[in-house]
Image (spheres, rainbow, N blue to C red):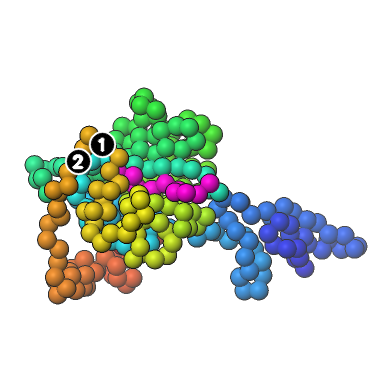
Amino acid sequence: IIFGDGCSMLCRCAGNYTFDCVDNTCDPVTEECREVGGVNGCHPKGTSTCVASGDPHYNTFDNRRYDFMGTCSYLMSEPCNSTDVPHFAVYTDNENRYNNPHISYVKAVHVHALGVIVSILKGGTVQVNGTNVNIPLSPVSGVDIFMAGKHYTVALNFGVTVRYDGNHYMEIKVIKDYEDKLCGLCGDYNGDPQDDFQTPTGELVQNPNDFGHSWNTDTECNKPDVVPPPGCTDDEQELYEGPAYCGIILDNNGPFAACHPKVNPN
């Protein structure tokens, strides 16, 4: 017979009116105590991921997708007006490539946390406070920098992980403690994708360009004339999201299904 509250102590009857107990405390950062199937236990906290990829396409924490072709430096995410969660800030620098002024790509990712700035530059150079370093490395307690597959990864000990492939793909993963507490190009993580386009002043805008430019952090860089290429019509969107084109990537029974646990197919 096993008993206990399931989230701090588990005990087993050992006979002769005695029992053995072991510590079963939940990890305060990554786990929470909740009832599943009538039994309390430690279970992973919910998370959400924001992605910037390609030229570049953005997918917010609340799963709003948009395109923004700015070529300045931008705040991707940080807690705004909230002091009850550990602070971090993630910025990206974007650039034009292939001699095409109408598209841009992520060329650097900067993670500010726990008194250090970790920068990952295009091609894979890693810097801490502006100095090149070799990884794996833990520059301060609570900040770990390492490779995970092809991604340069910065893991913070309060439930935030940032990854960049050194080319065009970057993502930020946060635990649900940050729900409704974030701002930047990744949105506010409140479960409503329709209010993600809030500027630093709290104004809700509709145009991705207005939203993106509002989070420009480089006062010397101002390119309000940058416009995205024309979007798809509804018919084109339906066609290219279908099984004959990109939709095959999402098919749980398709040839990419084995990749889904490793790479978010969205």
Question: Residue most toward the top?
Answer: 131
The disc label shown at residue 200, or none: none
The one nearer the camera, 57 or 26, is 57
Badge 2 element: loop
Q: Is residue 75 magenta?
A: yes
Question: Residue most toward the left?
Answer: 99
Q: Quadrant of residue 152?
A: top left
Q: Is residue 135 left or right of residue 16?
A: left
Q: Is residue 110 magenta?
A: no
User: Mark 2 and mark 1 in contact (Cβ < 8 Å)?
Assistant: yes
On the rendered image, what quadrant is the C terminus found in?
bottom left
Q: Residues within 10 Å of mark 1 (few under 14, many from 20)?
A: few
Which residue carries the number 1 mark? 219
**Mainly helix, strand or loop, the magenta region?**
strand
Asked if one can make out residue 96 in the rendered structure from this viewpoint, the answer is yes
* Residue lying at 45% horizontally and 42% vertically, measured from the top left: 88
Q: Residues within 10 Å of mark 2 (few under 14, many from 20)?
A: some
> Height in image: 218 above or below 207?
above
Q: Is residue 262 left or right of residue 23?
A: left
* Residue lying at 55% horizontally and 53% vertically, measured from the top left: 30
Asked if one can make out residue 92 in the rendered structure from this viewpoint, the answer is no
The one nearer the camera, 178 or 83, is 83
* Residue 131 position within the rendered picture, expressed as x and y whole percent measured from the top left: 36, 24
Q: Amino acid at mark 2?
A: Asn
Badge 1 element: loop
Q: Which residues are magenta?
A: 74-83
> Height in image: 102 above or below 221?
below
Q: Is residue 64 left or right of residue 220?
A: right
Q: Amino acid at mark 1?
A: Thr
Which residue carries the number 2 mark? 222
* Residue 7 position within the rendered picture, expressed as x and y whole percent measured from the top left: 68, 59
